[in-house]
């Protein structure tokens, strides 16, 4: 009879997970920085892995969105095509582990590049989640900021072939996500800056660390005194600076670290 598949972990990874668990146990102000990689285990493709979104479509630049009704239509068609996915996706073990640490007061903030709302779906509050690139579940007017419901926009689009203008000021409506070429949200950037500077442990989970200015926060935290841990399938440009790098899947790794925490302090590392 064929045996069960071998566990993916090896001794070196086990040691790294013990180290992570020990640092989590000691942390008083842990900050988690997440990218598309934390949501792939929920079935949302990332951008840069093979088969990722960018191998299939180019993003619409913000200036094109403003200037070109055709670019706006393309954006909305893509958004509506994703609606079923956004409605169906659920937080995975990685999101749940981070939310668990937040509920225990260890994780003070999540700085996320994701737009999928899955940290909140895992139980984190809006105050705990800093969304650098916005949230695709919401939409609003680019001029006056009034909120617009995606379902209303879709009904209008299905009838008229384009999204409605803002019903208050006539401005252009857009999903509440930050497109390429669009200014970063000031208040979120300030919150992320403050959280990074206060961190004693800064965990990157599932980011290629190639999109700036978001990718500047890990090094900012480290300069301000935090330990920097990078948990990502593939190498990142900041691995050399990190105090610990784990090239492994996020969900199983964080579950294993939390398992060690549940058993009490991780075993001594100098055995
Ligand atoms: P990215 O695609 O550049 O990098 C994701 C990284 O995660 C890759 O290095 C990949 O190796 C790693 N990864 C993927 N699955 C993993 C797993 N299960 N365990 C461990 N590592 C895993 O993503 P990014 O750094 O977030 O930057 C791309 C931009 O894409 C962001 O600005 C974000 O706004 C946007 N984006 C968001 C979503 C989402 O909201 N879920 C999805 C796609 C893209």
Image: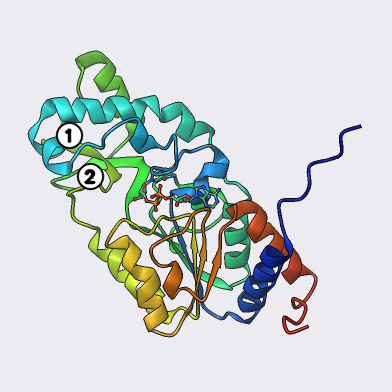
**165 or 69, nearer to the observer:** 69
Tell me, yes or no, whether the two marked residues, 2 and 1, touch with CB atoms within 8 Å.
Answer: yes
x and y percent of residue 112 in the render? 41, 57
**Residue at the farthest right position:** 1
Q: Secondary structure at mark 2?
A: loop
Q: Is mark 1 within 8 Å of ligand 1?
A: no
Q: Using the rendered view, name the quadrant where residue 33 is placed.
A: bottom left
x and y percent of residue 86 in the render? 46, 35
Whichever of callouts 2 and 1 sits on the residue coming sooner in the sequence is 2
Label 2 Cα crowd, 10 Å radius (few <14 / some 14-19 / many 20+): some
In the picture, the disc for residue 167 is 1
Q: Secondary structure at mark 1?
A: loop
Q: Which residue is painted at 44% across and 48% down in the image?
A: 36
**57 or 85, nearer to the observer:** 57
Q: Which residue is painted at 26% across and 48% down in the image?
A: 178
Eyeballing the image, is 88 above or below 243? Answer: above
Circle 2 residue: 146
Can I make out residue 175 in this image? yes
């Amino acid at each position: 009879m064929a045996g069960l598949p071998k566990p993916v972990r090896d001794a070196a990874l086990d040691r790294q997970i013990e180290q992570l668990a020990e640092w989590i146990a000691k942390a008083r102000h842990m900050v988690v920085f997440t990218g598309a990689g934390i949501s792939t285990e929920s079935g949302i493709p990332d951008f840069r892995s093979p088969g990722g979104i960018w191998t299939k479509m180019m993003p619409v630049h913000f200036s094109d969105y403003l200037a070109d009704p055709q670019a706006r239509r393309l954006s909305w068609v893509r958004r509506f095509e994703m609606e079923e996915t956004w409605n169906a996706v659920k937080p995975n073990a990685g999101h749940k582990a981070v939310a668990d640490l937040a509920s225990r007061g260890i994780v003070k903030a999540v700085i996320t590049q994701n737009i999928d709302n899955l940290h909140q779906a895992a139980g984190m509050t809006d105050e705990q989640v800093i969304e650098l690139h916005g949230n695709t579940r919401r939409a609003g007017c680019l001029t006056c900021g009034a909120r617009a419901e995606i379902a209303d926009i879709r009904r209008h689009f299905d009838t008229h072939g384009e999204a409605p203008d803002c019903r208050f000021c006539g401005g252009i409506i857009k999903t509440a996500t930050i497109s390429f070429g669009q200014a970063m949200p000031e208040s979120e950037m300030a919150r992320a800056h403050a959280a990074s500077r206060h961190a004693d442990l800064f965990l990157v989970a599932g980011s290629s660390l190639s999109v700036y200015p978001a990718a500047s926060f890990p090094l900012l935290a480290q300069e301000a005194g935090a330990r920097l841990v990078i948990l990502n399938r593939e190498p990142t440009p900041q691995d050399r600076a990190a105090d610990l790098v784990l090239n492994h899947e996020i969900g199983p790794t964080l579950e294993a670290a939390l398992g060690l925490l549940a058993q009490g302090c991780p075993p001594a590392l100098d055995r």
